[in-house]
């Protein structure tokens, strides 16, 4: 089975995951849309029709996140829609982000929540890991308790996996990826 990293072509974590994936001879897919500037390789451009498929999944994620979708900006809506393609056919999620009140922060929260919702809907036994850049701890989502727990260094990504996260990454998160891929 091929190892394939799926990401979003943004600066920061997306680009970093892509660099580590290709260095480790994983295939790479960065999902973007027409007005999304990216200087990454391996881009797959989503059409407006493809992007609109994500709306029902974003509405469901919004029930948990208590944010606003759709928002006033087509660009931001399309960024969130792109997140659906990052998680829709993946076996595991690895994210660099932060937590507040037990919730993943930023745009990463949308992809993580859609992945959790998908796993719950189909009773999938899949892994979702987040490196909290505030505490420098790895967390794993525990489906049985619907909560996050500190887990230590997760297994090295393999199979069809998603690598996502914040546009602003820390030096400690880079060191964690080095450890993760040397694992």
Image: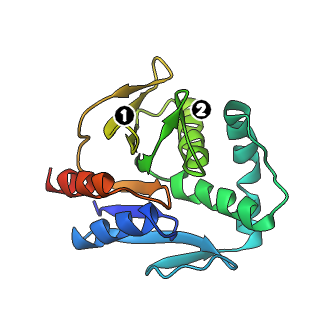
Whole-percent x, y for residue 13 in the image: 43, 61
Whole-percent x, y for residue 130 in the image: 40, 42
* SS label for mark 2: helix
Point out the frontmost of discs 2 and 1: 1
Q: Residues within 10 Å of mark 1 (few under 14, many from 20)?
A: many
Q: Which residue: 64% across, 76% down?
A: 36
Q: Which residue: 73% across, 57% down?
A: 53
6 with respect to 72 (left or right): left
57 with respect to 148 (left or right): right
48 with respect to 129 (left or right): right
Please state the total of marks drawn on the protein image: 2
**Would you identify the image quadrant in which residue 26 lies?**
bottom left
The way the protein has been coloured in the rendering is rainbow
The residue closer to the viewer here, 138 or 162, is: 138
Whole-percent x, y for residue 78 in the image: 71, 64
Residue farthest left in this picture: 182
Label 2, label 1: how many angstroms apart (C-alpha)? 22 Å
> Can residue 158 be seen by looking at this rendering?
no
For residue 121, the mark is 2
For residue 139, the mark is 1
Q: Residues within 10 Å of mark 2 (few under 14, many from 20)?
A: few
Whole-percent x, y for residue 116 in the image: 54, 36
Earlier-in-chain disc, 2 versus 1: 2
Q: Which residue: 47% across, 42% down?
A: 98
């Amino acid at each position: 089975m091929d190892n394939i990293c799926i990401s979003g072509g943004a600066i920061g974590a997306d680009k970093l995951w892509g660099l580590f994936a290709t260095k480790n001879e994983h295939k790479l897919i960065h999902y973007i849309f027409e007005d999304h500037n990216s200087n990454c390789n391996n881009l797959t451009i989503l059409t407006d029709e493809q992007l609109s498929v994500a709306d029902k999944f974003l509405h469901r994620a919004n029930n948990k996140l208590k944010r606003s979708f759709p928002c006033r900006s087509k660009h931001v809506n399309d960024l969130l829609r792109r997140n659906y393609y990052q998680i829709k056919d993946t076996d595991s999620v690895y994210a660099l982000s932060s937590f507040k009140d037990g919730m993943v922060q930023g745009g990463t929260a949308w992809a993580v929540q859609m992945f959790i919702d998908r796993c719950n809907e189909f009773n999938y036994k899949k892994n979702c890991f987040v490196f909290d850049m505030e505490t420098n701890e790895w967390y794993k989502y525990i489906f049985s308790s619907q909560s996050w727990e500190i887990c230590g260094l997760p297994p090295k990504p393999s199979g069809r996996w998603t690598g996502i996260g914040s546009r602003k990454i820390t030096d400690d998160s880079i060191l964690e990826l080095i450890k993760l891929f040397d694992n």
